[in-house]
Image (tube, rainbow, N blue to C red):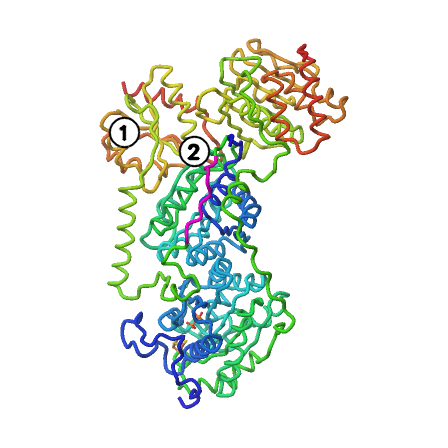
């Protein structure tokens, strides 16, 4: 099967169905609507459900229902819709229900605009809903990864019984690149914990309510133990020319692609730059960053928000080395040359 | 209470011991005389009588009945405040054979969840909703509900509900029965023994409606809340009978159970092989399958080795994005790495559009093209906008009879032709983008041809595009 040139948003849905997703609930919003449109096309033909919900609030609660029934399910939205889903995501995490949510980030706050930003980092990576919970977050930087990481997201969601985000920006969603499909589609059997409307599962219950303080504390500690395990076992990142790098650039999604160009341009000028690209934003590759702090002399974080990712980088580096920040927002995306200028200045300051 | 004698034998659909409850596991958490307890019994009895216990999934709301799962020995899903109809939708869609009950109070259903119930009803979601209307917020201690009668005091309407501040009581059954889809909607009450028997019948019928595969049903139950109302249970029941039924008349608002058709059974799921093929085939079933032809020689006009950074720009309608896609497909056909990125966001102003195409023999780092090696400018504004960014020695294609004033870079190569006018002569000005592509001479014609076969939907356009391509090649002196 030759590679096929497809859009990032399309790849998400195709990956989802190949991974056994059989329910999609969504509400239109640019730049994520194409995902719902693709789901509306493929889902019924794959024997699944597509439903355009009356709001993102309804959509996320439909996920709650289908997840409880043991069906792999997903939704997709962008900033304003993800904000509305936060209540439901907190309930999903509290009731330990798996699902996948794609956030194709756009400009904010408020209505902002429909251009790409990375300003949902906080609400997606740090929570956004109430209570002590985390969502796992995967950040693709290519169309192939939109497919692969969406598939992985379903496995992680089931493994951890927790919502998992695929966090991308409008660029990755709109972009077309060649994609290779896996040889086989999968459809995992319904898990034993699901409520299936039959005798065997009649005893099963989903709730996030624990009235007794001791019960709730035990529950919350159990959740935290899962997140700790994810931190140990699920960290994923990509390093590009970091072995001998003096300056480590850090960025995810479309920014990481631009940063690869920057690394190449900088190296051509004799600046020893390298890139660390987190693929999981939670769990965050803190350890890797910390160890790079031993060999590199500085870090520069580039992001399409005024400084969200940088907080995690600074926490990881623990002040061992300076961490600089370069940002563009509003839908503006820095060119490789623009960042190269920043890198040059930084390089001068550090010799 | 003697009124409820009919119910005193414990239903099978209840757990024999309420293990999920921390203390007093033989009795419910409801206050004496609370309507929830009575409705629970009626539902459990109906489940028993219909023999659907194993198939039933109960969705518990937020409100005094949040703990319904303490009691019902069925599949249990407790959900967020007001969202039960959405969650029930998710369950029913996943398990069409199950009996899904959305159990909700009046704050839950008529206030915070008003959107969810309206749309579930309007979709005709084949679920059963039991709507407990006690005209107050019980769980949170007596705040006003959308259903609180005019003049009634509550902790948040201390001077009585007023039409000027809180508006009129919301009549959910009436509102929902204005919709086409619902199959069965009835309002019943727990005001006396006879009314309770009526409620029992309605509840059973609503469940039976779902068991028969018919659509949406909702039973609104006028229900006493002696604790918040600060009444003795008997007085609360009397108040339901005498006062609440005045505001909310008992009636069957909708009954299409006789004529409603069962929903068509879901189609059997396709095999995983079929699913794999569906996904691999893609949304636009291709007019011709991709050939396995050996990779064609890279750019017949091999500029700068195998690393093309192309910017295509022009007015909307000139086929800018399409031209970019043909380039990317042709690159893919030639066995190369490619990326295509449409202009998006702030770049997309004033009706112009552009796209970034990269074609390389190595992995592509940034898909954004900030320093193009090839600029394909289909109109003048695009030329002015991007000319300065073109790398020295790059190629600039411009759609016009001559370069406009101001386009005075000497360190790039130009191909200037009235591509749109040429296409117009061929039959359709919109093929100007493909004439330009021919003139660019970036790929072997065979690679472009298979790209076109993949992207172009109609024979007419395919034929036109082939002629356009040829015209483009000829205008710069390439013959084939
Ligand atoms: C989002 C949210 N807002 C508010 C609440 C608090 N709350 C819990 S129950 C309830 C009202 C329940 O009233 P009703 O649905 O009439 O049920 P009842 O207790 O009377 O049976 C409210 C406002 C909540 N749990 N969640
Ligand atoms: S407060 Fe009212 S609704 Fe709640 S349990 Fe007591 S009587 Fe029932």
Q: Residue at x 49, y 51 (%)?
A: A22
User: What secondary structure is marked by label 1?
Assistant: loop
Q: Earlier in the sequence, mark 1 or mark 2?
A: 2
Q: Considering depth in this image, is B279 or B233 the residue closer to the camera?
A: B279
Residue to which mark 1 is pinned? A322
Above or below for B326 versus A85: above
- Does the image show residue A333? yes
Secondary structure mostly seen in the magenta stretch = loop
Q: CA distance from mark 1 to mark 2?
A: 26 Å
User: Which of the image's four quarters has the N terminus of chain B?
Assistant: bottom left
Indicate the quadrant where residue A192 lies: bottom left
Q: Residue at x 26, y 63 (%)?
A: A215
Measuring from the top left, give residue B371's x and y in whole percent: 50, 19
Q: Residue at x 71, y 31 (%)?
A: B459
Tell me if the residue at label 2 has its CB under 8 Å from ligand 1. no
Measuring from the top left, give residue A254's x and y in whole percent: 44, 32
Q: Considering depth in this image, is A14 or B236 the residue closer to the camera?
A: A14
Q: Chain letter of disc 1?
A: A
Measuring from the top left, give residue B6's x and y in whole percent: 44, 87
Q: Residues within 10 Å of mark 1 (few under 14, many from 20)?
A: some
Residue to which mark 2 is pinned? A141
Q: Considering depth in this image, is B114 or B48 the residue closer to the camera?
A: B48
Indicate the quadrant where residue A351 lies: top left
Measuring from the top left, give residue A307's x and y in whole percent: 37, 37
Which numbered disc covers residue B70? none
- Is B390 on the left-hand or right-hand side of B21? right
Give the magenta part as a residue range.
Answer: A181-189
* Ligand 2 sits in quadrant: bottom left
């Amino acid at each position: 099967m030759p590679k096929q040139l497809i859009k990032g948003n399309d790849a998400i849905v195709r990956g989802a169905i190949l991974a056994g997703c059989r329910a999609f609930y969504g509400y239109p919003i640019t730049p994520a609507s194409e995902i719902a449109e693709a789901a509306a096309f493929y889902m019924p033909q794959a024997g699944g459900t597509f439903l355009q919900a009356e709001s993102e609030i309804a959509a996320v609660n439909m996920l709650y229902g289908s997840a409880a029934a043991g069906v792999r399910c997903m939704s997709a939205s962008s900033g304003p819709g993800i904000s509305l889903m936060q209540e439901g995501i907190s309930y999903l995490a509290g009731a330990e229900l798996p699902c996948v949510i794609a956030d194709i980030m756009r400009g904010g706050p408020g209505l902002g605009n429909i251009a790409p930003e990375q300003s949902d980092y906080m609400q997606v990576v740090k929570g956004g809903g109430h209570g002590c919970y985390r969502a796992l977050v995967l950040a693709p930087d290519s169309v192939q990864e939109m497919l692969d990481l969406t598939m992985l997201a379903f496995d992680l969601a089931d493994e951890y019984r927790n919502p998992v985000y695929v966090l991308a920006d409008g660029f990755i969603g709109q972009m077309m690149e060649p994609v290779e499909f896996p040889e086989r589609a999968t459809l995992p059997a319904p898990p034993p914990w699901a409520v299936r409307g039959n005798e065997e599962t009649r005893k099963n219950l989903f709730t996030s309510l624990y009235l007794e303080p001791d019960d709730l504390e035990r529950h919350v500690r159990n959740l935290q133990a899962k997140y700790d395990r994810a931190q140990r076992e699920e960290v994923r990142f990509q390093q590009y020319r970091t072995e001998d790098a003096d300056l480590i650039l850090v960025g995810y999604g479309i920014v990481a692609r631009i940063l690869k160009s920057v690394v190449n341009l900088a190296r051509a000028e004799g600046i020893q730059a390298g890139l660390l690209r987190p693929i999981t934003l939670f769990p965050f590759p803190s350890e890797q960053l910390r160890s790079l702090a031993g060999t590199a002399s500085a870090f520069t974080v580039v992001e399409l928000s005024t400084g969200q990712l940088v907080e995690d980088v600074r926490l990881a580096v623990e002040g061992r080395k300076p961490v600089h920040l370069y940002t563009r927002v509003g839908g503006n995306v820095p060119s490789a040359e623009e960042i190269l200028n920043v890198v040059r200045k930084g390089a001068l300051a550090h010799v | 209470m003697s009124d409820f004698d009919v119910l005193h034998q414990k239903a099978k659909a209840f757990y024999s011991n309420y293990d999920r409850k921390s203390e007093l596991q033989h009795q419910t958490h409801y206050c004496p005389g609370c309507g929830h307890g009575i409705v629970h019994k009626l539902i459990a009895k109906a489940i028993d009588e219909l023999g659907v216990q194993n198939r039933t999934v109960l969705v518990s709301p937020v409100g005094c009945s949040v703990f319904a799962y303490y009691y019902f020995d069925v599949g249990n899903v407790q959900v967020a405040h007001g969202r039960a109809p959405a969650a029930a939708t998710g369950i029913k869609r996943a398990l069409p054979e199950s009996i899904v009950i959305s159990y909700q109070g009046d704050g839950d259903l008529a206030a915070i969840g008003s959107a969810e119930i309206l749309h579930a009803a309007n979709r005709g979601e084949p679920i059963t909703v039991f709507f407990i209307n006690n005209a107050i917020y019980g769980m949170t201690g007596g705040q006003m509900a959308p259903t609180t009668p005019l003049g009634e005091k509550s902790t948040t309407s201390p001077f009585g509900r007023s039409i000027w501040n809180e508006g009129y009581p919301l009549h959910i059954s009436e509102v929902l029965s204005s919709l086409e889809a619902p199959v069965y909607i009835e309002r019943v009450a727990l005001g006396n023994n006879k009314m309770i028997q009526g409620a029992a019948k309605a509840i059973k019928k609503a469940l039976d409606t779902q068991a028969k595969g018919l659509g949406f049903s909702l039973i609104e139950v006028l229900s006493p809340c002696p604790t918040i109302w600060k009444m003795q249970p008997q007085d609360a029941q009397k108040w339901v009978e005498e006062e609440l039924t005045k505001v909310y008349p008992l009636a069957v608002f909708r009954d299409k159970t006789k004529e409603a058709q069962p929903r068509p059974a879901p189609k059997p799921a396709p095999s995983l092989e079929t699913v794999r093929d569906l996904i691999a085939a893609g949304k636009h079933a291709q007019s011709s399958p991709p050939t396995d032809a050996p990779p064609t020689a890279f750019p017949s006009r091999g500029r700068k080795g195998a690393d093309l950074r192309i910017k295509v720009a022009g007015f909307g309608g000139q086929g800018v994005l399409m031209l970019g896609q043909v380039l990317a497909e042709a690159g893919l056909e030639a066995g190369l790495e490619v990326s295509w990125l449409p202009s998006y966001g702030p770049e997309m102003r004033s009706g112009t559009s552009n796209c970034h195409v990269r074609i390389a023999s190595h992995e592509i780092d940034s898909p954004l093209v900030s320093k193009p090696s090839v600029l394909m400018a289909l109109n003048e504004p695009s030329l002015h906008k991007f000319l300065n960014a073109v790398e020295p020695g790059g190629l600039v294609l411009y759609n016009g009879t001559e370069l406009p004033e101001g386009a005075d870079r000497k360190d790039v190569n130009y191909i200037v032709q009235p591509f749109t006018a040429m296409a117009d002569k061929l039959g359709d000005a919109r093929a100007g983008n493909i004439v330009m592509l021919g003139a660019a001479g970036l790929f072997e014609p065979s690679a472009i041809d298979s790209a076109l076969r993949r992207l172009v939907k109609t024979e007419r356009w395919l034929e036109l595009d082939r002629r356009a391509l040829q015209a483009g090649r000829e205008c710069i002196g390439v013959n084939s």
